[in-house]
Amino acid sequence: MDLFDLGGRAFRARLRKELPGWRVDGLVSDAGAADLARRYHLDEEGVSAAAAAIYTLGALLIGGGVISFVAWNWDRLGRAAKLSILLAALLAAHGTGYWMWRVRGRLPKLGHALTLLGTIIFGASIGLVAQMFHITPTAGTGYGLWAIGAGVAAWALGSVPNGVLAAVLAAIWGCARVSETQSLYVAVPYAVAVPFLPLAWRLRSRLLFLATALSTLVAMTWAATAEAEEAIAFAAAPAAGAALLLGFSCWAREGTPAAHFGRVSNLTGLLVLAPLLFLCSFEDVAGEASWTELSDAPWTWSGFAVPAVALAVALLVGARRALLDRPATLCAALGVPLVALALLPARPDVTGALAANVVLAAIVIAAVTSAVRTLERAPFWAGSVLGVTVILSRFAEFDTELWLKAIVFLACGMSVIWFGVVFERRRRVAREVGSA
Amino acid sequence: MRRHWRFAVVLLVQAAILAAMAGRHAAARAWGTAITLRTAPVDPYDILSGYHLVLTYEVENAPDALLPRGLARGDRLWLLVRRAEPAWELEAVARERPGETPDRVALPARWDPWRRAAIEGADRVYIPETERSRAEKLFRDAGGRGLVDLRVGDDGTIAVLRLRVGGASFGD
């Protein structure tokens, strides 16, 4: 199992379907079936996730309608009437939702979605109050207040959708706050992460973990860039956060509660690092991202970047055995500090771009070879796409003869098709051997 | 009822936030000192709160002679305005809140290199979308100038009451 593996849902659905038959046929004992069910969390409601998504989408759309209705600024109603309507709608949505979800319990997912609608109506009410009293929403205050209301709903009701909304709103607040006040550079990422990561842990929600991680990474990037106003800050801040995610994923051993978040942490870390390395693989970008550009810039943003890197190193060192089983993660963990070091010289040095290309190549090779070994489809294709993208980018970056470009394009295309066919054939053979 | 306390907390917190937002401005509207400032508005569109006009005020453009030294972006300022007709006029700019009288009121502001002494919390007025075209025409005809009626609370909270331009009133 490696970086690109989202896996799980389809396998669990199949296993849930097959397991009763295996028990009847005597292929697994009752105890073995129970162990499998526990190990793969077969009691979790994965199938009804689609219904929950539809209800949530419906709540978001209705909420959008309410916000547009408010923004329409209808003038025939007085201030008190407008506010009364929205407060009544807020109460109705929360009340009905809570009754369906927690009191009666017959339509829990619809009820849950209605509580999300209640929080969206709360956000619309913030807009209306600002409208009624001509209040200027300074430094993202409106989004901050909305995030508090959504966060309280998430914690009090144990609601993942409210938590996701709150995490996203907190990031928007943080970015606006930093931009407008030119302060709180260090505090904002912590303000986004600290309230919601424990909630993700408590609710065992990968979705909330992902939303919080991405919101925090956005806040880190925004804060560092707003303060330093240099390309290296734009790259270093999210790289520090991504390194922490990778470290956590390696530290979260199978069988521990943390392992529940291992895959999503791993995937998010790589999906952030890969584009950053890709950007640094361009000579011009790497030149702009030299550390020397930061010499006179403020460094308070290191207040979140340095602890993230230190914690990442500690986690990776603590999990060094797990790293050996994850070659792509190992390449990323070793490669990012290498690229950071290579970005030390001032322009027009090419060391940074060279290092980024080497590290990307190592990640691609590690992902593809490990996929060939484990026959997992996602790392194979993700690694292949990344590798081809890097190769084609180099040819787009440098002025070469057209015949050479033609050969490389043809070679890349044929290689992808050839290796893809071979890989899929190996998978099929392995499946047939397994079923026989 | 005890087991539903979490639901009550959600409602209470969300309602309290709305009440706190409205409360300060409602108090300033009810009991604050009424003043009028001359403005020159522009018109962006805010996706959250509908159509509004961004207001800038003549008194924000304080002459250098009145400004404290060594101002940096975001520094707190107080604009002391005195009663005049049709709009109140700037008398002094200070870092500390100056003493006030019925004819002299202090307005909180922040130093901004572009807007200079930007008054806090009074830079937009919402108007109904149905009046948008009419408002735009009146502003054009008035050369982009108007008067804004405000109330200033004891704590410095500013409540925008209305914008007057070309004999019409918006935002009441």
Image (cartoon, helix red, strand yellow):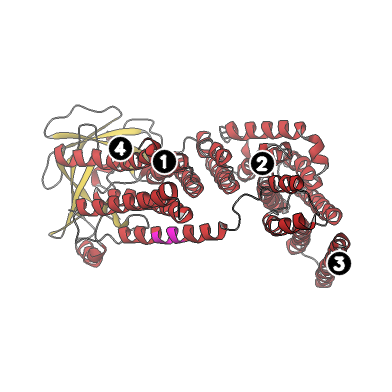
Q: Secondary structure at mark 2?
A: helix
Instruction: State the separation of the CA atoms marked 2 and 1.
Output: 25 Å
Instruction: State the separation of the CA atoms marked 1 and 4.
Output: 27 Å
Of the numbered discs 1 and 3, the one sitting upstream in the chain is 1
Which label is found at residue A148? 1
Same chain for labels 4 and 3? Say yes or no. Answer: no
Q: Which residues are magenta?
A: A58-62
Residue found at x 31% / y 46%: A136
Which label is found at residue A425? 3
Q: Secondary structure at mark 4?
A: strand
Instruction: State the separation of the CA atoms marked 2 and 4.
Output: 42 Å
Give the quadrant of the C terminus of chain A. bottom right
Image coordinates of residue B152 in percent, x first then y, are 20, 38
Instruction: State the separation of the CA atoms marked 4 and 3.
Output: 71 Å
Q: Main secondary structure of the magenta part?
A: helix
Instruction: State the separation of the CA atoms marked 3 and 2.
Output: 34 Å
Q: Chain of mark 4?
A: B
Q: Which residue is mark 2?
A: A245
Residue type, mark 3 in image:
Arg
Residue type, mark 4 in image:
Ala
**Tag 2 near tag 1, CB within 8 Å:** no
Same chain for labels 3 and 2? Say yes or no. Answer: yes
